[in-house]
Image (cartoon, grey):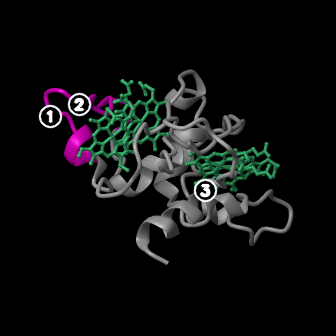
Amino acid sequence: MNSISRLLVGVGFGVTAMALPSGVQAQAAAPAKPMVMQHTAQGRAQCLMCHGGKMPNIVAAPTSHEGRGVETCMWCHAKDASIQTKDPGPTTHTLQGRDQCLMCHGGTMPNIKAAPAESHKGMENKNCTMCHPAATK
Ligand code: HEC
Ligand code: HEC
Ligand code: HEC
Ligand code: HEC
């Protein structure tokens, strides 16, 4: 498996085969809206200590989460995460030759939309398609 397909499998974007009119890009489904974490984050920064599947009475992060680091959890589950109120929008192109997202979307390319700096702080290339699933052709 190459690194891109491993990434796609890792984030669990199942792509449903369907007939498309020619010229329309095949698009992976938009990610589901994450539920808001109801408990405080105070003293609970090590999310996977409890949600890693080892605590019998605490719900485990689903298998779709495999490979997600603990630094990613609040990007989706915090009450004030931007994904709670805004639509991330799909990656409108394929990943072929474009896995270095921030090279183009890092704010240094005048004609390409930059990832909003504040809401995207700390995010790396390997994280982008979790929220912006890519076109498959
Ligand atoms: C000390 C243990 C502990 C830690 C650490 C912890 N949680 Fe939780 N979490 C719980 C418990 C207990 C519940 C509520 C009961 C349940 O459903 O398991 C819960 C519920 C949740 C839920 C709701 C699950 C659902 O199905 O509704 C989410 C989302 C969540 N936590 C995310 C996080 C995130 C993100 C972090 C890290 C910032 C975190 N948790 C850290 C114990 C913990
Ligand atoms: C890209 C957004 C995203 C990230 C990042 C993310 N989650 Fe989730 N999480 C979701 C969504 C969406 C669901 C709802 C179930 C699903 O669609 O997989 C969910 C479900 C959960 C649940 C509830 C499972 C259940 O059965 O009720 C827990 C617990 C959880 N996540 C914990 C975590 C932890 C811990 C992390 C960090 C390692 C994390 N999440 C990172 C989006 C995210
Ligand atoms: C070589 C430069 C380049 C790279 C690398 C690149 N993109 Fe793009 N991206 C573009 C351009 C140009 C557009 C707008 C036109 C289009 O859809 O091709 C775009 C469009 C987008 C859009 C739609 C919003 C918009 O700007 O209109 C998203 C989301 C996106 N890219 C995410 C990503 C992600 C995620 C990655 C990495 C997996 C990535 N891009 C890698 C050049 C790039
Ligand atoms: C946890 C989910 C999440 C992750 C991970 C994520 N984004 Fe976003 N992104 C969003 C949301 C939500 C928006 C909507 C605007 C905002 O956040 O202010 C957005 C907006 C954007 C936009 C602006 C599109 C427009 O139309 O102006 C670009 C470009 C973008 N993201 C690129 C990236 C890149 C590149 C990465 C990886 C470094 C990335 N995103 C990672 C959720 C995410």
The disc placed on residue 85 is none
Residue 112 falls left or right of residue 4: left
Q: Is tag 3's residue or tag 2's residue first in the polypeptide sequence? A: 3
Q: Is residue 131 magenta?
A: no
Q: Is mark 1 within 8 Å of ligand 3?
A: yes
Q: Which residues are magenta?
A: 102-120
Q: Locate residue 82, reporting x and y percent.
A: 50, 28
Instruction: Give the residue displayed 42% in from the left and 47% down from the top.
Output: 128
State the image quarter where residue 40 is shown: top right
Residue under numbered circle 2: 112
Question: Callout 3: helix, strand or loop?
Answer: helix
Circles 2 and 1, Cβ within 8 Å, touching? The answer is yes
Residue 128 falls left or right of residue 48: left
How much space separates mark 3 and mark 1, taking CA atoms? Answer: 36 Å
Near mark 3 (Cα within 10 A), the count class, few <14, some 14-19 or many ≥20, is some
The disc placed on residue 47 is 3
Q: Is mark 3 within 8 Å of ligand 1?
A: yes
How much space separates mark 2 and mark 1, taking CA atoms? Answer: 6 Å
Residue under numbered circle 1: 109
- The secondary structure that dominates the magenta segment is loop
